[in-house]
Each structure stands twice: as C-alpha cells, then as structure tokens.
Amino acid sequence: MAYQAEYIWIDGTKPLALLRSKTRIIADGKKPAIWGFDGSSTNQATGSNSDCVLNPVFTCPDPLRGPKDILVMCEVLNVDMTPHPSNTRARCVQLATKYASFEPWFGIEQEYTLLQDGRPYGWPESGFPEPQGPYYCGVGGSKMPGREIVEAHTLACMRAGLAIEGTNAEVMMAQWEFQIGVLGAVEVGDQLWTARWLLNRISEEFGVDASLAAKPIKGDWNGAGAHTNFSTKQMRANGGWDAIIAGCEAIGTRVMEHIEVYGVGTDERLTGAHETAHWSKFSYGTSDRGASIRIPWAVAVDKKGWLEDRRPNANMDPYAVAAIMVETVCGAASAKKAPAKVAAKKAPAKKAVAKKAPAKKAAAKKAARR
C-alpha cells in the first residue's frame, strides 16, 4: 500500500524564513526522491524561472498520520543541483565536515510563545495577567495555559524519534520550552526544524499560533530565546576546562559576527535585563544567567563539559548558529595547534678571497728573480 510523505522545507521569506510543506503519495517499497516546487510563491524564485528542487536530507515517522507515513525534511537546491541561496544547511555541512575531528555536539533550548488573536494564549482580553514569577515550571489552574498543546507536541516528537530531551513552562505566561539534542551540528538543525514544524502543525488544531518572536510582548516581560549548548570532544574530556575557556574567548573575538546570525529582534530581547546580557557586550561566567555565555555549575565542578551561549533568539536558524560556532571555536583551536612555521635561516655569506691583479702578480715574480 502507498504511504504519505510530508516534504518540509525552509522558504526564502525575510527577515524570518517560514516553514513550508506538501504531501506526496509514494508507492510501497519506494523511498522519497527529489521533488520540486514553485519558488516564486515562497520568495525563492521569480515567476519566469520558478522551479526549485527539494532534496530529502532527514526522514522520520509522521506521528500525526498512519504507521507507514513519514516526515521528510528537505534542503532547497537550484535545478542544477547546487545549493539555493536560502539553503543555510549546505554551509553547515561543509564546516561540520571540515572540523569533524573535534566531534562538535549541540543541545538547543527552544523557547516559544503561544498566541491567540495576537495575544498570548490564556491572557485576559484586556490588561495583563499577574507579573512574572509563578509561571516558570509552574503548575495549576489558569496560570499554565497551553499545557495540552505542549503535551501533544512532546508526544509527537517522541513518536517521531526526535532527540527531544524535555519540556518546561517558561518565565512569561503562555511561554514554553522544549530541548533538542545532544546531536551533531547538522543533525540538530534537521531535528529542530522538524520539531518546529510539528509544533506549528499541532497548534493549528487548537486554533493557536506558536510564535518564535524574540520579544513577543513589549515591556517588563521576558523575551524568547534558543539557548545553544555546545561542546567539543576536547571540552568533554578530563581536564577540558581550558578548552571551554578557550572556546569562550574565541567567541568573544567575533561578537558582532555571531549576533548577526543569532536571529531577528536581538536589540529588543538582549537589553541587559530579563536574564540577558546586552547585545553589544560580551561576557562569560559560571552560573551567570546575565552573561552572554553561561558555564553551568556542574561543568565548573567537573572541569569538563560544555558552554551555553544564551544570546541566540527563539527564531534563529540552527544551521547558521551551529555553523558559526563550529567555525569560531574549532577554527581557533585548529589555528592554535598548527605548528608555527620557522623562517629559513640564510646561510652566512662567504668572505670573498681577494685576488691580486695579474699585473701586480707578474711584478712580484720579476722582483723575486732579482
């Protein structure tokens, strides 16, 4: 019997890309092959040259359909099979391959806000709920709207075989979080985008939108981030503390380059308040949620482990974030390990032996005969 394959891809909408998907019916025994779509409708092509290619890169069971149906995460290619300009995965693959010996691992904490009719889900129609305080990891009554959506999404991720590690309510009412990892640089992007698609798809059934806005509600309310936990095998090894500090220092040399790919809304979210460091400054510290990078206390005790970059926004592209972190940290470590080139020493110049002029030599011989 044929089965359904839901092809999922990231479009070219700016400043924030959107997820798109469509269903393909595939004959029993066949695997999902490359497919196409109209790029002129997704901000990825013009009407006069609209064809784009969907290349399957990750598949998993579809937890919302039948037992044989699957989800197919795709990268977008041009018709000549080169990466489309909107394809950030291709660069992530290149850097992950280049620095594979470092075995970089990622765990991403994806925060999101449930919205209904433009307001956070469960908020009063006018005014505001009680100030932040009881909502983080809270339980009970009207304080925790959206839990049924969270539970449905968690179960769907588990049934799909995604590396979901946990969920929790966040600091602002109607704000939640799930964690994906620990995975490689490319794999964490594949699975996080798939989990985001499932979140949006499940939210449809409740008449709710799952927003990844960095600052969904202005004022004295927490923003939404995607705290990115990162390590290399050197950091995870015994005595890895020095590698962790070196990683923090390396990231600190490229502050603005990282901020540029950490998502939209940085200036609104990273203000220096609400458990954030200011976007224009860089710092790191143990257990410091007001630092750019937090080193967990357990890591400080064990002197090995990982670092947590708290600056990426909820709407960040995990392929782009993983790529720049690998490039920065592993690149700096590679440069440090490379042996310094010793300049070749020039051989000392030989002293020239002075030759007597022929005329003087003849005169000397003549004098000797006398």
Image: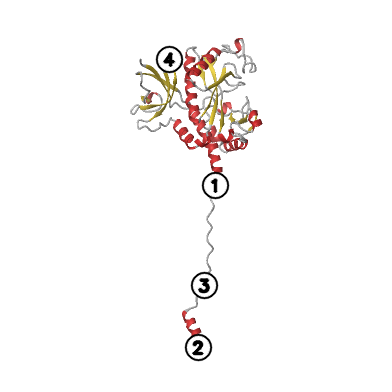
Q: Is residue 317 visible?
A: no
| Marks 2 and 4, how far apart at CA | 118 Å
Does the residue at mark 1 contact the one at mark 2 (Cβ under 8 Å)?
no
Q: Name the residue under label 2.
A: 369
Q: Distance between the residues labelled 1 and 3?
A: 41 Å
* Residue at (43, 15) in percent of width and height: 67
- Amino acid at the residue labelled 4: Pro
Q: Which comes before the other along the chain, label 2 or label 3?
A: 3
What residue does disc 1 label? Answer: 339
Q: In which quarter of the image is the N terminus?
A: top left
Residue 113, percent across and down? Answer: 54, 19
**10 Å neighbourhood of mark 3: few (<14), some, or many (≥20)?**
few
What residue is pinned by disc 3? Answer: 353
Which amino acid, mark 3?
A: Val
The Cα atoms of the two marked residues, 4 and 3, are separated by 94 Å
Q: In the depicted view, which residue is nearer to us: 272 or 1? A: 1
